[in-house]
Image (cartoon, rainbow, N blue to C red):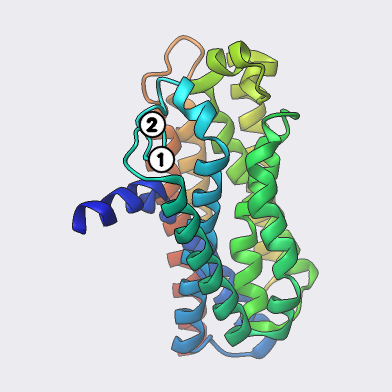
Amino acid sequence: MFKKIGVFLEMIKIEHTLFALPFAFMGAILGSVTVNGHLPSWAQIGWILMAMFGARSAAFGLNRMIDQVIDKKNPRTAGRAIPAGLLKTAEVIVFTIVCFVLLFWAAFELSPLAVKLLPIAVFFLVFYSYTKRFTWLCHLILGLTIALAPLGGWVAVTNNIDWTALLLYVSVAFWTAGFDVIYAIQDMEFDKKEGLFSIPARFGLHGSLKIARYFHMVTAAGFIILFFATDLSWWYFAGMVISYFILFYEHFILSPNDMSKLQTSFFTMNSVLSIVVFVFTLIDLVVQFH
């Protein structure tokens, strides 16, 4: 049983939770303070955690089922659970349904607007996995999907969306798209061979690194606008500056002549960035209430 659980956790890349979850909590605390004038309750945080687990796990389950034929052909992904025979498609279908139930349950416990927006969230969770079959903008679609985490956190505790929430949404969307372009460089030659669409397959290594930098410049601009547009103060500003250094270093260690640190750039740097921005935002808002 524990082995099977381990296979499921590997399938949904549980460690990648470090990308979106901190921003989901950031959206929740910033939205609650901005709109409600207080920090969210522990119950709200718990339901948001369940919603996040349900949404991202369902998305991974769908992706692994939809891409299983492609994954089997790709040497990098041939060892994934379904193509390797570690999980049956039927098992993943049941797992995905359960995860969607958790998402729906959490949404109903959080806010009416969260429930109304569920069809949009489900659409993006399903649609993304098909996009690399017809557009190199798939990275931006993934960004718009993962950025539903902070937007969902905001909606969960405020029951509304304003332009500040949308600013955070766009900032996280371009951050995600940028690091996904870097990640997709690993499959550049495979994508070309199989006729799949991606920015690396379309623009090559040099062009992809440049586009990823441009995407992260949008994120950097969004973070600074967020500082001036809200009551966030110097704690957030300090975290934002640290995040700028992380983004710079993420691109500094990569070049068309040396991609050996791709995993560090993709996973380590971005995991640290999301945690830093959330923690400094949390400190900022907690300090304001004391």
Residue 66 falls left or right of residue 258: right
Q: Residue at x 70, y 43 (%)?
A: 141
Check if mark 1's residue and mark 2's residue have beta carbons within 8 Å.
yes
Q: Amino acid at mark 2?
A: Gln
* Residue 170 locus on image (x, y percent): 71, 53
Which residue, given by chain and number where applicable, does mark 1 sit on? Answer: 267
Which residue, given by chain and number where applicable, does mark 2 sit on? Answer: 263
Q: Residue at x 43, y 33 (%)?
A: 265
* Residue 159 locus on image (x, y percent): 71, 83
Q: Is residue 63 above or below residue 6?
A: above
Residue 125 in view in this figure: yes
Q: Quadrant of the C terminus?
A: bottom left
Q: Could you say which quadrant of the image residue 79 lies in?
A: top left
Q: Which mark is residue 76?
A: none
Q: Is residue 201 above or below residue 53?
A: above
Q: How many other residues sit within 10 Å of disc 1, few (<14), some (14-19) or many (≥20)?
A: some
